[in-house]
Amino acid sequence: MVVDDRLVERKLLLKRAFPRIELFEIGKELNIPYFNRFMSGWEIDEDEASLEIALNIGDAQLKEIFDKHAPRGWAVFRGKHYTFEDGHLRLDGSWRVIRANLYQAKKKYGKTCVAILRAMVETGGSCSLKELRKNLRQGVDPYPILAELERLKVVDTSYKGDRYQEWKLLEEISPLIQSELGIALPKPPAPEIALPTTPSVEIEKEDYVQEERQKVTMMDNELDESINELFKRRLNATVKFGKSFSVASLAGYLQNLFGPILYFDSLLSIIQQYGLADVEIVHPQGKTGMRTGWSLALFGEPGTGKSFSTRDMVLGRPEAKIPAHGIPGRNRYCGGITPARFIRIGQAYVNRTFNFVVPEFNDWFRYSGMVDVLKLAMERGEIKYELHKEVIGPYRFQSFLSVNYNTAVFGRGYEITISDPNFNAIEDRMVCRLHRLTKQRFTEIAQSQMKLALGEIDIEKGAQNIRDHVTLLYAIETRHPLVREQFPYKPVMITPQAYSMIKTAREAILEKIPHEVVKFSARLEDRTIRFACAASILNYFHSNLDYIPVSEEALKYAIQLYVEEASVRSHEEFKPEEILEKLI
């Protein structure tokens, strides 16, 4: 079969220049049937999506796409037919220039240059000085040759830190290098073919898991790419931003955008992103056994802004001009996924911590036999699920959930009734937040929608700063290889003051409840502490201490969450504002 190398380059160029959400928008605009299968860009496969677009366009449409949509400014492409550099697309290739430059480098450095390029072709990825020295004569320094090759646009820097640098050979240039240097790579062995010996349902299960593992790899690459870009272009600015940024700054940013009621839900979603690093919580005498991660449930009637807070603010929604605020590559959108498929794909996340965004969590409880399994998922426990012809697990689910739970809420003065018996399953396992369509909430939703539609809200810069900040802190606190040597891991230290403030809030709440029976559990205080500690991670750059103290600002918002949630779970037997006026 003859392969159209122009088509191959178009596909590779589109994938490199545009994130998956933008590819989704491009595909929808072009009315390509492939994209009708998906609700959002987070569900598509980047390879498939970029190929489908490449198959349906020519050079003129490619140019129009790059003119209309914003490609990644850092992306570089030097192909045989297309060139993309410094934010500009040219419909002519770079090979002629690179071939001449390669001749210069070979003439100047001879066999050493060839050995370096051969090693880079064989690895198929990035190489450091240490790795390249293994392929050279002892005492030969590859750095000046790499610097020259980079100046000649034969190689490119993939990562550069204060004391460490990696170089890569762009995928589209590799065929030219192999041809010019006479490098013939060995063909990989043919894969072994085994006849199926398991039932068809078991094969389907394995396909689900294998497919999900590929998605996990894609998400890992997305995170690595984002950290790499941040380090190259915005590291100093992000550290500077972090030295003054705090939970109060975040709350102020969100209040200016959405108002005094609507903002708190987005605050919860973004603080959950900071907690996703699952940092240890310690006290002055040692470990507490607690960590900063927690699951979030926004519950109540449809149309009250739950999806906006849990999905749009975290993942982004370009068509509504809402940029992503969440950690790249760490939020798995579960729109359209059944609970049975969820517990299957969960096996791909063993020993990993991600956040699963579930738009209609209540639907999952309608499936027979799922309540107990979903309880285990919320508890980050060991999951095992048995069907007639299939056994899933056992495996330990260590990720978190961010869910919308649509349920009827009937307001009678300050009392509410949750008319859903399954809601008790999540109430004590997650941070919960009630949504009722009050007049004030309705007004704030309407005003925000109008401002966004008219372009009066510009949150692009603020979102980028916050996303860079949470991504950098996630990388530091999870000891990502790119940052491990530059920034220390810091646990969060809980103080006696924090417990004292929670105790004061507890006593004030119990005093307001007119009977002996308390309708919420002590787990609510555990969630309050986790929230306060996650919100304190924002202060990582505020001091040179080897731990992060729980901040007074974080405790203030945690106490607000505690009192308001206790009021809801107590069927609003007391007004939270009466207590908060005295405490905060």
Image (cartoon, grey):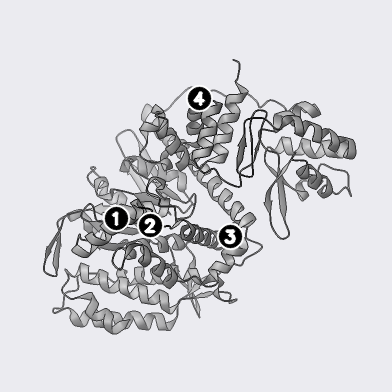
Residue 359 vs residue 424: left or right? right
**Mark 2 to mark 1 CA distance (whole Å):** 22 Å
Disc with the residue nearer the chain's start (2 vs 4): 4
The amino acid pointed to by label 1 is Lys
Whether residue 128 is situated above or below residue 459 in the rendered picture = above
Disc with the residue nearer the chain's start (4 vs 1): 4
Find numbered disc 2 in the image and state the secondary structure of the residue it sits on: loop
Disc with the residue nearer the chain's start (3 vs 2): 2
The picture places residue 520, in percent across and down from the top left corner, at 23, 69
Question: Between residues 200 and 467, which one lies in front from this camera angle?
Answer: 467
- Residue density around tag 4, few if under 14, some if 14–19, many if 20 or more, within 10 Å: few
Which of discs 2 and 1 lies nearer the camera? The answer is 2
Q: Is residue 170 visible?
A: yes
**Mark 3 to mark 2 CA distance (whole Å):** 39 Å
Q: Circle 4 sits on which residue?
A: 55
- Residue density around tag 2, few if under 14, some if 14–19, many if 20 or more, within 10 Å: few
Residue 309 vs residue 47: left or right? left
Find numbered disc 1 in the image and state the secondary structure of the residue it sits on: helix
Residue 306 is tagged as 1
The amino acid pointed to by label 4 is Leu
Find numbered disc 4 in the image and state the secondary structure of the residue it sits on: helix
**Is there CB contact under 8 Å for labels 3 and 2?**
no
**Is there CB contact under 8 Å for labels 3 and 4?**
no
- Residue density around tag 3, few if under 14, some if 14–19, many if 20 or more, within 10 Å: some
**Mark 1 to mark 3 CA distance (whole Å):** 32 Å
The amino acid pointed to by label 3 is Arg
Q: Circle 3 sits on which residue?
A: 479
The amino acid pointed to by label 2 is Glu
Which of discs 4 and 1 lies nearer the camera? The answer is 4
Q: Circle 2 sits on which residue?
A: 456
